[in-house]
Amino acid sequence: MNTSALVFQKNKWTPQQRTSTAGYVFNEADDRWVLDKDSKLNVKAVADLIDENLVPGYIATLSHFATNHSGDHAQSLNYHLKKYLSATGKSSFDSEGLINFRSSLPPHQDYYAAKVRIFLSQWNVLGYHGVSDSLMSLLNGWRIKGNIKGDAVKRRDPSKGPLTDNELAAFNESAARGFEMGQLSIAEIAMALLISSTGVRAVQVSHLRVGDLDASQKNVKGEPIFVVQMPRAKGRGESFRETFTPHSIRGELWAVLNQHAKSVIIKFEKRLGCELQESDRQALPLFPSASAVDEIDSTKDLLQISDHQVLHVKSSEINAVLRKVVSKGKCFSERTGQLLEVTAKRFRYTTGTRAAREGYGVLIIAELLDHRDTQNAKVYIRDIPDHVEALDRAMGHQLAPYAMAFAGVLVDREEDAERGSDPTSRIRYQGAGTGTCGMHGFCGANVPVPCYTCANFQPWLDGPHEKLYEWLHKERERILDMTKDETIAAVNDRTILAVAQVIKLCKARREELAEEAENG
């Protein structure tokens, strides 16, 4: 029998078996509660810090949140309650401890006190010993500022805020390159591009099923409209896959998702040794948990848990895939000079910021980000002129080493390149050779502009890179003057950074060759 069970027995209070809002069954006597595939509560860690006679009240209150709210909410409250106990060294709740706890918090963490107040308020309502009415009078008298909404967006935080256009392009290029090189699976590139393209939460992607991919509708031209029916998240008391929001996606992403869905069906049917009915295929998780799939031995097992979260990949694994895209693709931020820091939340910020820049109002942005109201969406429509900064010639050279936009390899001469002996691999600009394409296969790119950000490109030391650099800047200025739209004018900014990087590499290589010649 565990420690909590002994406490229950001593206080003559019987623990119950409960069910979370996600459908997970847990026992109040257990040291850890699993509320959904992403939320686990360390009950013992808190119970060990408080007086024995307060444990029933703590367990009953935590159980209330676990059975009536999301697992994430219950986990957050439990975390902050532990913060209070650890910070104050208290084993109970009194005015002195709570006042000292709040006074110790920096302004941006004042909402920690609000989390503790929420928990203790419910404790008091349930009527268990430990939280008096006089203590609640103190707490209710506090005016606590909530968590600062959109702070990372407003500050354009280079590590936590929205990505720049160049950073977003770099991430998408890294994902595509990683898949081409076999570093990412089709499931991983599907996850990454779905997050970066839609700005949805990781938990929404994790809850997707094969049947959520919909191409049944057509536009006025008779062309298919590709839609992902995205499960909504973060609704108070909302059950697993209860409501959905349609997201329109581009054909290229649809092709990746559709191919991945087919591979999921094949994986399950191979595991079960039989063909599934179409309805069962549609109910399969689009991103299944590998460990859960390994435990399925029959179609009966599959049908029994098909409506459960356990078959779906954890949200933390999706964020891990985003980081893998960055690490494998050596995806750098031009603002920090470091590997790009990515989470699904940053892509949400990016989606909202780009929408505001395009002139969409707060209602549209709230709908785009699947918010229940416009409170959080308002941050995106403030200080809109700061969203984009023009890239001039000087900045191109300054930022180039940090952006790491050039993904290929510089060669001294054509014959040093892979496929250098093949004339069809030669890339030209205004009749002069700029480099060699090392890809063995068809490429429909409009060379040479896209080549500089391609991993297969091998620019030559004596190529006309400076001329191309000047032309790209003039073209940028021409488009901006014609359209007055910074977004359209910035379409080749990442290429400009890549060409600038090649120019710098050429300069360094010439200096190296000159030194070698001098030293004989």
Image (spheres, rainbow, N blue to C red):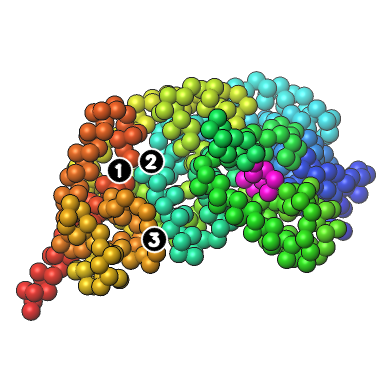
Relative image position of residue 168 (x, y in whole percent): 42, 44
Q: Secondary structure at mark 3?
A: loop
Say whether residue 409 is visible.
no
- Cα separation, mark 2 vs mark 3, equals 28 Å
Per the rendered image, the range of residues in magenta is 204-214
Q: Quadrant of residue 506?
A: bottom left
Relative image position of residue 36 (x, y in whole percent): 73, 47
Residue drawn at point x = 13 percent, y = 65 percent: 511
Residue behind mark 2? 165
Q: Secondary structure at mark 1?
A: helix
Relative to residue 440, is residue 132 depicted above or below?
above
Residue drawn at point x = 9 percent, y = 69 percent: 514
Residue drawn at point x = 41 percent, y = 39 percent: 157
Residue behind mark 1? 493
Residue behind mark 3? 442
Residue drawn at point x = 60 percent, y = 39 percent: 227
Say whether residue 413 is visible.
yes
As shown in the figure, which amino acid type bears the numbered disc 3? Phe
In the image, taking residue 295 as reference, residue 515 lies left or right, namely left
